[in-house]
């Protein structure tokens, strides 16, 4: 039998395999796999870094933040093929040996990632970390679904004279903080929030920023210039002159749906020394020294709620108080021991146990949502602790809002981790 047809058939098979190999699309598949892995790795490292810095603050060590500046990956694709075999005569004859043909190939890729780390530092970052959190940020968080009591306990250290462990906004204090009345007030706010009896909203306020101006001095040019400066002319009460006014957005806490006279609402008003006959109270930034910003009406009740907020670093110090430490570290005075008025040890879990808990053990933990190794021990948040995980997630959002757009210093570490 002629060998030409058989050889042509083998050749055709080789060509089909070669075309199929070169036509495979490995790039998109590799991208799908690596993208998810990098995303997960960055998420885990950020969580570990945040927890590690909380532990450092507990030990009065400096917090250090490294941001992943860039991740670049090079994919090197490799494909090869081979063919081997023997062609025998008399293939069809009785007792003849058939042709033997072996076709092989290999297709793969090598990934070579390069990761650049940049330290978050400099004046811009430090100012963002140390600046008080704005009331607008607090309202934004409550409007995005976070519980009002969780947000206030983290971000506010005083509200109309109610102290929320203000001394815990820095390194661990030696004396027990005051926090009970504030915690009760936030629980009342939470009940009113759940029953839809209160709401945080914005209200436009118009304030006069100039004295009376004669009408003949008002020209089209002055109106345009005023608009560029964010002010406008308005007629005064005597209708014969004008004043410059400026509009601003004021934050208001408003009681609705019967909340004005509910038992929780009345109790909250008494604790905050608010006028019971009002349903709307402005939220103002507390002035330095406390006690400021509390407008009063004729009956003596306050018309507004003055809030003194923590900085981002203050929030981190506050949550670091809820970190458990080994007894040997306490005995060695590696951390500050806080005591009550009678000299007995203060239990920080009494204040933070229903908000944030970080456990410690000598061996690697099992079932941890996030864990870090520091000073010979493992510190971790349990994966089944939904409360602590929620608070930790809120801290992450606060960090992004406060410091996320801060300029980082020049890259200090570039790791080519590929082969």
Image (cartoon, rainbow, N blue to C red):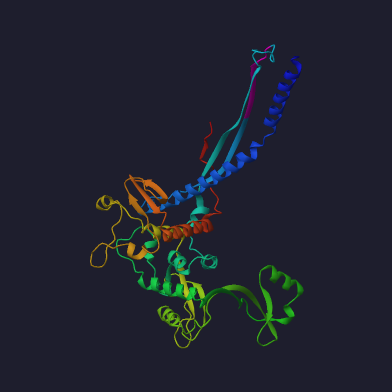
Measuring 47% from the left and 83% from the top, which residue is drawn there?
296
In the image, 184 versus 258, the foreground residue is: 258
Q: Does the image show residue 130?
A: no
Residue 178 is covered by the magenta coloring: no
The picture places residue 394, in percent across and down from the top left corner, at: 48, 60
Q: Quadrant of the N terminus?
A: top right
Residues shaded magenta: 78-88
* Residue positioned 54% across, 53% down in the render: 406
Instruction: Report whether 1 appears left or right of 361.
Output: right
Q: Position of residue 34 (x, y in %)?
A: 57, 41
At horizontal 48% and vertical 69% (from top left) the residue drawn is 148
Compared to residue 215, the image places residue 118 above or below, namely above
Relative vertical location of residue 171 with respect to residue 39 in this rendering, above or below: below
What is the quadrant of residue 343 in the picture?
bottom left
**In front of the other: 319 or 309:** 319
**SS assignment for the magenta stretch, majority:** strand
Residue 235 vs 357, above or below: the answer is below
Q: Is residue 81 magenta?
A: yes
> Of all residues shown, which one is farthest toward the front?
94
291, 353: nearer the viewer: 353
Q: Could you tell whether 396 is left or right of 226 in the image?
A: left
Establish if 20 lies above or below 378: above
> Residue 240: percent from the left, percent from the top?
70, 86
> How many numbered circles does the render carry?
0
In the rendered image, residue 280, in percent from the top left (x then y), is placed at: 53, 80
The answer to whether any part of residue 250 appears in the image is yes
**Residue in the picture at 24% in, 52% down:** 331
């Amino acid at each position: 039998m002629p060998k030409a047809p058989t050889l042509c058939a083998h050749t055709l098979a080789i060509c089909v395999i070669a075309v199929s190999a070169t036509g495979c699309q490995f790039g998109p598949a590799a991208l799908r796999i690596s993208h998810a892995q990098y995303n997960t790795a960055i998420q885990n490292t950020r969580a570990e870094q945040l927890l590690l810095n909380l532990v450092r603050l507990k030990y009065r060590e400096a917090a250090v933040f490294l941001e992943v500046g860039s991740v670049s990956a090079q994919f090197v694709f490799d494909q090869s093929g081979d063919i081997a075999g023997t062609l025998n005569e008399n293939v069809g004859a009785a007792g003849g040996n058939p042709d033997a043909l072996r076709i092989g190939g290999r297709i793969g890729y090598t990934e070579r990632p390069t990761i650049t780390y940049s330290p978050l530092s400099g004046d811009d970052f430090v100012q963002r970390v140390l600046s008080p959190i704005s009331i607008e940020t607090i309202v934004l968080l409550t409007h995005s679904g976070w519980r009002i009591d969780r947000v206030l306990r983290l971000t506010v250290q005083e509200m109309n004279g109610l102290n929320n462990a203000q001394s815990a906004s820095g390194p661990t204090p030696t004396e027990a903080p005051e926090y009970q009345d504030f915690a009760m007030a936030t629980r009342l706010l939470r009940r009113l929030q759940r029953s839809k009896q209160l709401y945080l909203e914005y209200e436009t306020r118009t304030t006069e920023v100039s004295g009376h101006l004669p009408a003949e001095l008002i020209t089209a040019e002055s109106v345009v210039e005023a608009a560029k400066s964010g002010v406008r002319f308005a007629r005064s009460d005597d209708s014969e002159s004008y004043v410059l006014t400026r509009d601003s957005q004021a934050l208001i806490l408003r009681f609705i749906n019967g909340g004005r006279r509910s038992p929780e609402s009345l109790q909250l008003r008494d604790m905050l020394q608010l006028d019971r006959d009002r349903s709307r109270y402005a939220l103002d930034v507390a002035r330095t020294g406390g006690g400021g910003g509390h407008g009063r009406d004729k009956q003596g009740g306050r018309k507004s709620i003055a809030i003194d907020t923590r900085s981002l670093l203050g929030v981190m110090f506050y949550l670091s108080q809820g970190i458990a430490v080994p007894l040997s570290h306490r005995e060695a005075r590696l951390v500050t021991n806080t005591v009550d008025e009678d000299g007995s040890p203060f239990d920080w879990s009494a204040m933070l146990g229903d908000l944030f808990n970080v456990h410690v053990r000598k061996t690697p933990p099992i079932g941890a949502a996030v864990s870090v190794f520091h000073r010979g021990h493992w510190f971790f948040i349990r994966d089944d602790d939904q409360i602590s995980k929620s608070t930790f997630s809120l801290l992450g959002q606060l960090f992004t809002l406060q410091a996320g757009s801060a300029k980082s210093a020049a890259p200090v570490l570039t790791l080519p981790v590929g082969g």
